[in-house]
Image (tube, rainbow, N blue to C red):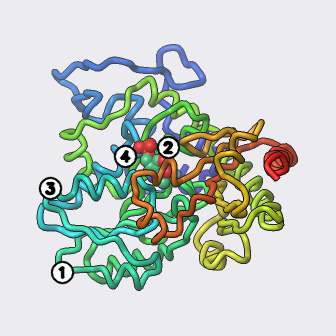
Amino acid sequence: MSKKKLGLNTICSHIGEVPDTQFKGAVSPMFLSSSYEFLDVDVKRYPRYFNTPNQDYLTKKIAALEHSEAAMIFGSGMAAISTMFLAFLKQGDHLVVQNTLYGGTVNFIKEEFPKYGIDFTFTNGYQAEDFEAAIKDNTKLIHIETPSNPLLTVTDIKAIAALGKSKGIFTSIDNTFASPVNQKPLDLGIDMVMHSATKYFGGHSDICAGAVASSSEHIERIWNVGKNLGGSLSDMTVWMLERSMKTLGLRVKAQTKNAMKLAKWLDKHPKISKVYYPGLKSHPEHQLAKSQMKGFGAMLSFELTEDLNSQEFQKQLKLIKSSMSLAGVESTLLSPHLTSHALLTQEERDAIGISDQLIRFSVGIENTKDLKEDIHQAITALA
Ligand code: PLP
């Protein structure tokens, strides 16, 4: 059976299982060995080589979900992204990178690239022409994030892929917010997809992991750097991640449906001055999002009116937790200016539109009436 023809939930629940040939158990056995036979074997296995049985098999599930030839899993999303960058950029090369993206990625580029002699340009905007304007003779990689963290801007994936191809520049995307349930960038021409698997892949706020999916050739290039940097994931966590991913399709679809309902409700709330969600018709790239996403995702952001203090608002919530991460089955929210984008200066945050009133909302699987009620009572308590 061709993997592409299998349905989403079938891939999630079946592909990439380690067969239990000994006891015929229904789920993958966990192989915790960090030491394997090397004589007369086809593959020399070692955890840092990203090829233990559990690591090896789980990559098949990720590849099937992203429609890629191959994939790699890492100890964190940042291990995935840093390894991918360093595999495709060397001293004297130049990276074009989107200006609105996850703060940790921004910090990695700004703090580490100068030490490696790698040049970079953050775009002035997130449209294809902004990326084209930033390209130099030595540009080797264009990196995008769409929908982006935390403002949910949407970049034209096909246009970026075409731009890269026309100039002989590799393209990569952070697909964490959409997940492969809602967006498959490789089908749109992008070369490499990365994930913070800490988020939707894990989905229960108890795993830290990362992933990259691409052609076998690119994955080999990333593997060559990965084995030196050593960002592999422990097999116990790999096993947990496999178990979590069995429900990825179910979870993300339920969360996406909830986010749409919440976005519409928040948009009408008198104490919410702005809602950022690509599923809303008022979102500037709604049509583009519709054309390149299957669903609009379960992340949204909103701004409280000036009279409400965003920290006090979060303290009043009874059900929704303030939390540094996202994408769990439980709804969480945070203030980007205090967390994901805290290391940016006030000027940098102002320049990309991250105000102190902004709340990033990761919508879970709860009943939407309970989520609405919680937000409403928190606002009422402050008013
Ligand atoms: N990319 C995005 C969009 C994220 O939100 C995050 C973390 O929040 C990362 C990458 C980094 O992932 P990790 O925390 O797993 O290293």
Q: Amino acid at mark 4?
A: Met
Q: Nearer the viewer, residue 20 or 268?
A: 268
* Residue that badge 2 annotates: 61
Mark 4 secondary-structure assignment: helix
| Position above or below: 221 against 39 | below
Which secondary structure, mark 3? helix
Q: Is mark 4 within 8 Å of ligand 1?
A: yes
Q: Amino acid at mark 2?
A: Lys
The dot on residue 137 is 1
| The CB of the residue at mark 1 lies under 8 Å from ligand 1 | no
Q: Nearer the viewer, mark 2 or mark 4?
A: 4
**Residue at position x 60%, y 51% in the image:** 6
Lower position in the chain sequence, tag 2 or tag 3 = 2
Q: Earlier in the sequence, mark 1 or mark 2?
A: 2
Q: Is residue 162 visible?
A: yes
Disc 3 residue type? Tyr
Name the residue carrying label 3.
116
Q: Is residue 368 above or below residue 290?
A: above
Helix, strand or loop at label 2? It is helix
Residue bearing the label numbered 4: 78
Q: Is residue 60 above or below residue 67?
A: above
Q: Earlier in the sequence, mark 1 or mark 3?
A: 3
Tag 1 secondary structure: loop
Crowdedness near tag 1: few (<14), some (14–19) or many (≥20) residues, C-alpha within 10 Å: few
Give how far apart the Cα atoms at labels 3 and 4 are. 17 Å
User: Residue 123 occupies which quadrant of the picture?
Assistant: bottom left
Residue occupying the point 48% across, 43% down: 197
